[in-house]
Image: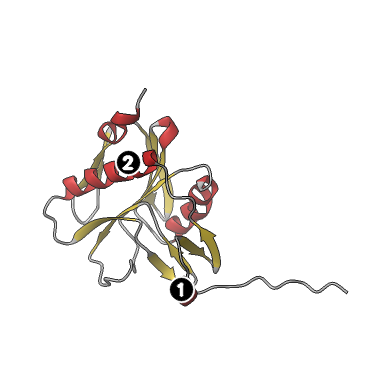
Amino acid sequence: MCAAKAIEHYSYDDYCLWEGKWELIAGAPMAITPSPVIKHQALAGNILFELKKSIGACERCLVLSEEDWKISNDTVLKPDVVLICDEPNDKYITKAPEIIVEIISQSTAKRDELFKYEIYEREKVPFYIIVYPDDCKAKLYKLENNKYSKQGDFSRETYSFEGTTCPAKINFDAVFRAFRR
């Protein structure tokens, strides 16, 4: 007789004990390995810089990279870059960021394009950007009527985010400039 193997369901408390970089989606652990390549990190830094520069001295908002967002007790994500405003907690993000940026790699593409897309839409993240490093392109989505609407593919344009707590924009030409061939 063959017994079915139970699948473990993990919580935030379990997540806090793990070494290395992880995400937790509906109780399932997802390793973030290996470390991002130089291009990934440079693009994240460029986007972070563009957002920080655009919000200026706004005291209500912060731009962060790879910070935990505890959505529920069994779902914790670590977006590449976020713009958060009026966050009451200093241990982790507790409410939907105003902007989330994920930079695609071969190992995370399905997670970023499908699972995280659905989670961010469900959690009402106003803007979701998926960056494709090899194409020097970003797909930008805006939440409209509780669904994401694609605003376009950006490579050399500047996008100004309407409706964010602090005025924000990203100059995609500056983000990708060093990586164009």
* Secondary element type, mark 2: helix
Q: Nearer the viewer, residue 97 or 121?
A: 97
* Secondary element type, mark 1: loop
Q: Furthest residue to the right?
A: 1
**Residue drawn at 29 percent across, 29 percent down:** 177
Q: Residues within 10 Å of mark 1 (few under 14, many from 20)?
A: few
Query: Label 1 is placed on what type of residue?
Result: Leu
Please, is residue 166 above or below residue 5 in the view?
A: above
Q: Name the quadrant of the N terminus.
A: bottom right
Residue 140 in percent (x, y) is at 37, 42
Q: Tell me the residue that label 1 is attached to.
A: 17
- Residue 156 appears anywhere in the view: no
**Residue drawn at 46 percent across, 73 percent down:** 17
Query: Label 2 is placed on what type of residue?
Result: Ala
Q: Tell me the residue that label 2 is attached to.
A: 42
On the picture, is 32 further left or further right than 8?
left
Q: Earlier in the sequence, mark 1 or mark 2?
A: 1
Q: Residues within 10 Å of mark 2 (few under 14, many from 20)?
A: some
